[in-house]
Each structure stands twice: as structure tokens, then as C-alpha cells.
Image (cartoon, rainbow, N blue to C red):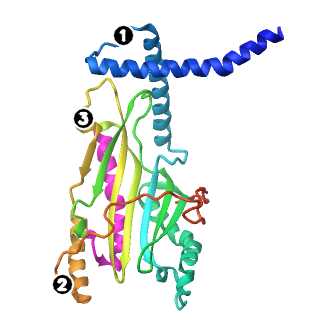
């Protein structure tokens, strides 16, 4: 009896993984062959290949369902639904009133020590617009040229907005819509720092409005990722944002290629136009000319996060105590 148990154990330990690997390879080969030959029928000519297709499809659907469940769960924090807040500044931004700056060789340590508390303000605007609770997932410090530091905080949040009706939508496909805010980036470039909070608040409202419109059209919507980038330079700052929205689609319904790869730059509202006058006034005050400056920093970049209160190379992650409204 013990010999049979040992044989069965060896079979399960070594034979089953090899069998599953072969079935998966045959499944992928079947898909590739059918795509090359233009075959659209569901049945495969080879029974083992057909079994592989079913197993591969079931596993793929399981992973997609788990991903959708995480994004559309209003009660649990998830890395699949977060805000990425990036700000570039000098060590002066972290000094208290009347406090002297440390020696240059200590600037990086100074920023690593104080940046987590400073970047906690990243939760303020989500809590004021689309989040009911907010928690730090990670923070990353990257030293740049001329005494500047780029600090990126990743925040998980619980939505305060309705996600839509997700009942009975198991197996629905998870679709994506990308949004740039604002479409005219010059409207939020080189504006007075005193206007930064109002601009960022408008951007948060704008992504919520985009999600609301998508939910009314498609039935569901979640702000999967919202990225805000801000670079201070003296008395001026440049702000930009982009968002990724997720919605559930019935696979039986017709979906165009545009629907599946929907990338949109939103139509600007008057909320951003008012900052153009502020920008011009700031240029004149600073003695600048009317020549258009190149956009600083290019696109928004998500850095590999270390844990909160950790340096960029640490590689761990730590949730801080969630903040709620």
C-alpha cells in the first residue's frame, strides 16, 4: 500500500505539472495555427488541443475576474486603484519657517527623512473629490540636477463615487480609457505657485467628471490610476495629469477597436483658461518674455516604489494608516 501511495505522490508531484505544461503549449500552438489559417470555429481538430484551449481560457478568465473584482471593490484597498503624485522641488520646500537648510552633502538624507510627511498632502485632494479613504502605498526619492529632487508617492484609495451596477457581470471584459488633462498643457505651465492648489483641485474634479460620464454611457467606471505631476521652479510651477479609467463590457456585445484602445484628450473647460492670465502676469512680474518654454519633464513617469519612509533602492512597501474624510 505504501508503495502505491509513494508512486501516486511522485505522479502528482512531477507528472501533473508536466501534463499541464504540455496542454498549455498545445493550446497556444492551436491558437497560433488557427489564427494563421483564419479558422474562427470554436472546435479544434485535435482533442488534446481543444482541452488545452478550454483550460487556458478558464484560467485566463479567472485572472481577469479577480482583477475586475479588485478594481470594482469599494471596501478594499488595491494596487489596481491608486493615485500617483509626483512633485519636483528643492530642499527649501521642506524647511520650516526660519529654518536653515542643511549642508549640500546632507540634502538627499534630509529629503528622504522629511518627504513622507510632506507628501501626505497628496491624500487631501482625492479625499476632497473622489475618495472616502486614502493610504500611502510607497514613496520614492530621486535626486535630479541643480539641487532638485523628484518625489513620487503612490496612494491607494477607496472610492467615494458610485462604481455602477456590477451585479451579474462575472466574465465581462475589463476595458480601458486613457485621459490627458488638460488638453492644452500650456494652460497649467509656469503658473504662480499660489494657484497650484486650485489647479490640482480642478484636475481631480475633471477626472471624476470623465468617470461619471463613462459610467452613464457604459454602466460602470472606476478610476484605476490618476497621475498628477508638479514641478516647482522659484515662484512658478507646472502641473499636468493623466488618468486611466476601467469599465466592464459584455463580451457578447460588439466592441470596436476604438473602444478597446480608447485614448482621449479631454475637452478643456473654462476652469483652466483662467490660469492663462495668471501665467502671463507672473511672466511679466518675473521679467520673462513671451517665448514659449519647452514642457519640463516630458510625460509623467511612475517610479519603482520603495516603502514609505524608505529610500528609492529599498524595494519594500509599507502601508501607512489610512486617512479618511
Q: Nearer the viewer, residue 67 or 130?
A: 67
Residue at the spot x=78%, y=13% of the render?
Answer: 5
Tag in front: 2 or 1: 1
Name the magenta segment's main secondary structure. helix
**Distance (Cα) linking label 2 and label 1:** 69 Å
Give the x, y percent position of residue 167. Answer: 44, 30
Asked if residue 257 lies left or right of residue 136, the reply is left
**Distance (Cα) linking label 3 and label 1:** 25 Å
Question: Crowding at label 3, few (<14), some or many (≥20) Cα neighbours within 10 Å?
Answer: few
Q: Which mark is residue 219?
A: none
Give the quarter of the image for residue 183. bottom left
Residue at the spot x=39%, y=58% of the render?
Answer: 227
Q: Secondary structure at mark 3?
A: helix
Residue 153 colored magenta?
A: no
Which is nearer the N-term, disc 2 or disc 3? Answer: 3
Q: Secondary structure at mark 1?
A: loop
| Residue with the mark numbered 3 | 257
- Which stretch is magenta? 188-217
Q: Can I make out residue 197 in this image?
A: no
Q: Nearer the viewer, residue 274 or 113?
A: 113
Residue 199 colored magenta?
A: yes
Q: Which mark is residue 43?
A: 1
Q: Secondary structure at mark 2?
A: loop
Residue at the spot x=58%, y=62% of the render?
Answer: 308
Question: Crowding at label 2, few (<14), some or many (≥20) Cα neighbours within 10 Å?
Answer: few
Question: Crowding at label 1, few (<14), some or many (≥20) Cα neighbours within 10 Å?
Answer: few
| Residue with the mark numbered 2 | 289
Q: Is residue 121 above or below residue 94?
A: above
Give the x, y percent position of residue 235. Answer: 35, 83
Q: Is residue 210 above or below residue 253?
A: below
In the displayed orientation, state which residue is furthest to the left.
290
**Distance (Cα) linking label 2 and label 3:** 45 Å
Amino acid at each position: 500500500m505504501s508503495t502505491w501511495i509513494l508512486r501516486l505522490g511522485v505522479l502528482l508531484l512531477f507528472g501533473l505539472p508536466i501534463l499541464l505544461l504540455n496542454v498549455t503549449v498545445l493550446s497556444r500552438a492551436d491558437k497560433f495555427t488557427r489564427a494563421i489559417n483564419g479558422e474562427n470555429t470554436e472546435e479544434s481538430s485535435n482533442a488534446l488541443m481543444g482541452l488545452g484551449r478550454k483550460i487556458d481560457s478558464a484560467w485566463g478568465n479567472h485572472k481577469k475576474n479577480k482583477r475586475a473584482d479588485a478594481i470594482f471593490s469599494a471596501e478594499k484597498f488595491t494596487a489596481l486603484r491608486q493615485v500617483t503624485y509626483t512633485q519636483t522641488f528643492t530642499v527649501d520646500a521642506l524647511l520650516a519657517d526660519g529654518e536653515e537648510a542643511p549642508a549640500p552633502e546632507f540634502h538627499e538624507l534630509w529629503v528622504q527623512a522629511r518627504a513622507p510627511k510632506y507628501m501626505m498632502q497628496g491624500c487631501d485632494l482625492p479625499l476632497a473629490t473622489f475618495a472616502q479613504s486614502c493610504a500611502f502605498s510607497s514613496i520614492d526619492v530621486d535626486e535630479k540636477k541643480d539641487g532638485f529632487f523628484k518625489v513620487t508617492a503612490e496612494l491607494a484609495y477607496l472610492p467615494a463615487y458610485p462604481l455602477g451596477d456590477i451585479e451579474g457581470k462575472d466574465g465581462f471584459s475589463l476595458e480601458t480609457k486613457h485621459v490627458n488633462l488638460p488638453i492644452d498643457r500650456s494652460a497649467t505651465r509656469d503658473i504662480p505657485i499660489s494657484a497650484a492648489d486650485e489647479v490640482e483641485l480642478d484636475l481631480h474634479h475633471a477626472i471624476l467628471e470623465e468617470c461619471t460620464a463613462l459610467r452613464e454611457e457604459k454602466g460602470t467606471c472606476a478610476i484605476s490610476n490618476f497621475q498628477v505631476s508638479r514641478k516647482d521652479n522659484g515662484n512658478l510651477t507646472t502641473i499636468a495629469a493623466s488618468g486611466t479609467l476601467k469599465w466592464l463590457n459584455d463580451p457578447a456585445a460588439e466592441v470596436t477597436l476604438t473602444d478597446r484602445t480608447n485614448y482621449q484628450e479631454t475637452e478643456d473647460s473654462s476652469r483652466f483658461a483662467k490660469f492663462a492670465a495668471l501665467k502671463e502676469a507672473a511672466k511679466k512680474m518675473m521679467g520673462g518674455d513671451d517665448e514659449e518654454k519647452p514642457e519640463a519633464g516630458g510625460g509623467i513617469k511612475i517610479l519603482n516604489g520603495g516603502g514609505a519612509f524608505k529610500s528609492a533602492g529599498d524595494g519594500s512597501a509599507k502601508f501607512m494608516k489610512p486617512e479618511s474624510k
